[in-house]
């Protein structure tokens, strides 16, 4: 089914469902967590000991429960034990995607033959966590989710007790604040109870302690060699302000939950429907046009900013320059590692007839070359890990993007391919919604917001809908011209051909030249790997693959450039180790669980 038709149907369903009050049907099988108890003990050596108790009530028959404990980078769990009261149990423990996963099978009999049914079970979990307490130069901190957002059900009340290594100069925060019931600090112990916490929400503790409470080396703590207190408090305040802002925005969007899908449909029918073109091709066996790889990438691959090339277009331009012999490939085996290093030799004699954006790529690579005009691609990732190099690279990359747009896709030329009036209108509509949200937020100060639960529910639905709209390609609300639509369909069909190895096997190119074009345009379209795999399968039918453009792929040049770009993008926007500490929702542990 056409993507746009599918999108239209989804919008119609959203309108229908937004006008209907959904009533949850009763289910014979259900469970709840009536209470939870969490006890934390912070040792002077930095070790955090955790005890958890969960009171499950089961209606119906169940196999057991599970518990997921997320682990941030550097954190680990030791001395894990699980016990149950009210049922016999068998525990299976595994590490999955950065979390500790506990699957606890529950049985009604000691022989483990009968499943539990209509009963109450207490689950006791105990473990030690390392590198969870953080020691900065001016303060020690613990940010810990007492209840995580990944639980399948909410909880009526949570009780927690936190034992600290000292009893002076302690500051603690409990967030989100609407879940606070009671809390107090006595000597070195924080005691607290929460209100009801719904599924999908978290409850978090942030406690700041003097460094003197900890041993000099504190081997089980994370050590950060910079001050952190000011950033932690700032991050906390910023997160709280952001949460309050979005809570209000959700309420405002709830009031608009009926209007926005209707407006989106109107915009789609007015600006988003594509013109009919006389083209019924299934796939294209050769590049449909002679346009530069960077231009093809800008129009076909970057669907969220049509007309602007991305890194795939940059990599395709490098391949094109290799094909033009502007860059020559050299390899050298490192005697220490026995690995083959990849080098690009810059050939200045071949630059006279290059396009502007190709000259920019040459200049960028020249910045990272040695005195002999040689770039060590194997070491480029390391070069771009330095902030100064990364910022320079990203500035030049953005200059390259503008060069491509100036040469091929300035505003006047882009309009011959794509009309973005609809997508621009939807962005303006979103900004207008934020302004209106602030106004309604001010009015909402004079009301009891808890009575606006139905509006908040509508706001959540609208937030999800708005997120989907934002993530959709620009051509959903924008529109290709007849010229652009034909261009788009042909290049999409060429991409489909390159992506399907079986099609290439049925219709292999007759010359090395076409294989090179496949690799170059495949890089621009994000399917270079598929082309290279198909090329290797057809190797026996091709007389000569000893060409730099093929060797570039063979020795991993494509991945070296891709990884270097990712590193440069990250290094150009650094953040300190304390940058995320204190922000709401950034605490350790949390996670969630459920029953099965």
Image (cartoon, grey):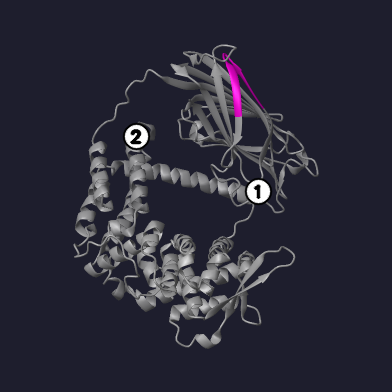
**Residue placed under numbered mark 2 in the picture:** 452
Which label's residue is closer to the chain start, 1 or 2? 1
Report whether 331 appears left or right of 593.
right
Mark yes or no: residue 394 visible.
no
Q: Residue at x 39, y 65 (%)?
A: 508
Residue 297 lies left or right of residue 142; in this view the side is left
User: In percent of the image, x 73 and y 33: which residue is there?
Assistant: 167
Residue 13, horizontal then vertical, whole percent = 25, 40
Q: Looking at the rendering, which quadrant does residue 219 occupy?
A: top right
Q: Magenta span covers which residues?
A: 81-92
Residue 328 image point, x, y percent: 56, 78
Residue occupying the point 26% across, 60% down: 422
Q: Classify 10 Å Cα crowding around label 1: few (below 14), some (14-19), many (20 and above).
A: some
Rendered view: 539 above or below 365: above
**Within 10 angstroms of label 2, few (less than 14), some, or many (20 or more) residues?**
some
* Observer-nearest of 588 and 78: 78
Q: Is residue 537 magenta?
A: no
**Residue 472 x, y percent position in the rendering:** 34, 53
Residue linked to disc 1: 229
* Viewer-nearest residue: 132 or 74: 74
Q: Tell which of 377 and 569 is nearer to you.
A: 377
Q: Secondary structure at mark 1?
A: helix
Rendered view: 318 above or below 98: below
Residue 42 percent coordinates (x, y):
71, 34
Q: Does 182 sit left or right of 433 as displayed?
A: right
In the rendered image, residue 87 lying in the magenta stretch gets the answer yes
Q: State how many labels appear.
A: 2
């Amino acid at each position: 089914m056409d993507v746009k038709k599918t999108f239209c149907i989804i919008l119609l369903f959203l309108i229908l469902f937004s006008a209907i009050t959904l009533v949850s049907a009763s289910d014979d099988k259900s469970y709840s967590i009536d209470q939870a108890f969490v006890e934390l003990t912070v040792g002077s050596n930095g070790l955090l000991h955790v005890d958890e108790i969960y009171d499950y009530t089961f209606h119906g028959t169940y196999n057991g429960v599970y518990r997921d404990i997320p682990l941030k980078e550097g954190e680990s769990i030791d001395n894990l034990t699980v016990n149950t009261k009210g049922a016999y149990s068998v525990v299976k423990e595994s590490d999955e995607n950065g979390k500790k996963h506990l699957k606890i099978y529950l049985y009604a009999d000691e022989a483990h033959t009968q499943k539990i049914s209509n009963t109450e079970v207490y689950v006791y979990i105990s473990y030690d966590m390392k590198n969870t307490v953080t020691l900065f130069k001016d303060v020690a901190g613990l940010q810990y989710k007492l209840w995580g957002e990944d639980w399948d059900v909410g909880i009526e009340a949570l009780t927690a007790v936190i034992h600290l290594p000292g009893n002076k100069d302690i500051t603690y925060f409990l967030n989100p604040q609407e879940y606070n019931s009671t809390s107090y600090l006595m000597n070195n112990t924080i005691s607290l109870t929460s209100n009801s916490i719904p599924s999908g929400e978290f409850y978090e503790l942030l406690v700041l302690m003097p460094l003197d409470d900890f041993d000099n080396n504190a081997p089980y703590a994370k050590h950060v060699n910079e001050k952190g207190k000011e950033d932690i408090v700032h991050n906390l305040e910023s997160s709280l302000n952001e949460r309050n802002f979005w809570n209000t925005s959700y309420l405002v969007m709830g009031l608009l939950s009926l209007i926005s899908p209707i407006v989106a449909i109107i915009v789609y029918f007015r600006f988003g429907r594509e013109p009919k073109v006389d083209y019924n091709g299934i796939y294209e066996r050769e590049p449909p046009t002679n346009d530069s790889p960077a231009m093809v990438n800008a129009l076909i691959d970057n669907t969220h900013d049509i007309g602007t090339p991305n890194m795939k277009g940059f990599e395709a331009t490098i391949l094109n320059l290799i094909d033009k012999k502007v860059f020559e490939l050299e390899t050298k085996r490192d005697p220490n590692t026995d690995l083959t290093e990849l080098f690009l030799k810059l050939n200045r004699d071949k630059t006279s007839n290059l396009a502007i954006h190709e000259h920019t790529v040459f200049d960028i690579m020249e910045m990272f070359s040695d005195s002999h005009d040689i770039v060590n691609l194997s070491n480029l990732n390391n070069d771009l890990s330095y902030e100064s190099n990364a910022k320079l690279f990203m500035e030049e990359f953005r200059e390259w993007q503008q060069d491509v747009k100036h040469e091929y896709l300035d505003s006047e030329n882009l309009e011959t391919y794509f009309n973005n009036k609809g997508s621009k209108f939807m962005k303006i509509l979103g900004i207008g919604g934020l302004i209106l949200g602030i106004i309604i937020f001010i009015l909402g100060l004079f009301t009891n917001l808890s009575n606006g639960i139905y509006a908040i529910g509508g706001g959540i639905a609208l937030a999800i809908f708005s997120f989907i709209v934002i993530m959709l390609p620009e051509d959903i609300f924008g529109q290709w011209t007849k010229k652009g639509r034909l261009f788009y369909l042909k290049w999409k069909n060429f991409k489909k051909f390159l992506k399907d190895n079986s099609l290439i096997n049925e219709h292999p190119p007759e010359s090395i030249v076409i294989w090179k074009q496949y690799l170059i345009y495949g890089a621009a379209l994000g399917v270079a790997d598929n082309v290279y795999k198909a090329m290797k399968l057809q190797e026996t039918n091709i007389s000569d693959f000893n060409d730099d453009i093929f060797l570039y792929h063979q020795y991993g040049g494509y991945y070296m450039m891709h990884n270097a770009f990712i590193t440069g993008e990250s290094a150009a926007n650094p953040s300190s180790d304390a940058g995320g500490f204190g922000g709401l929702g950034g605490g350790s542990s949390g996670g969630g669980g459920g029953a099965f």
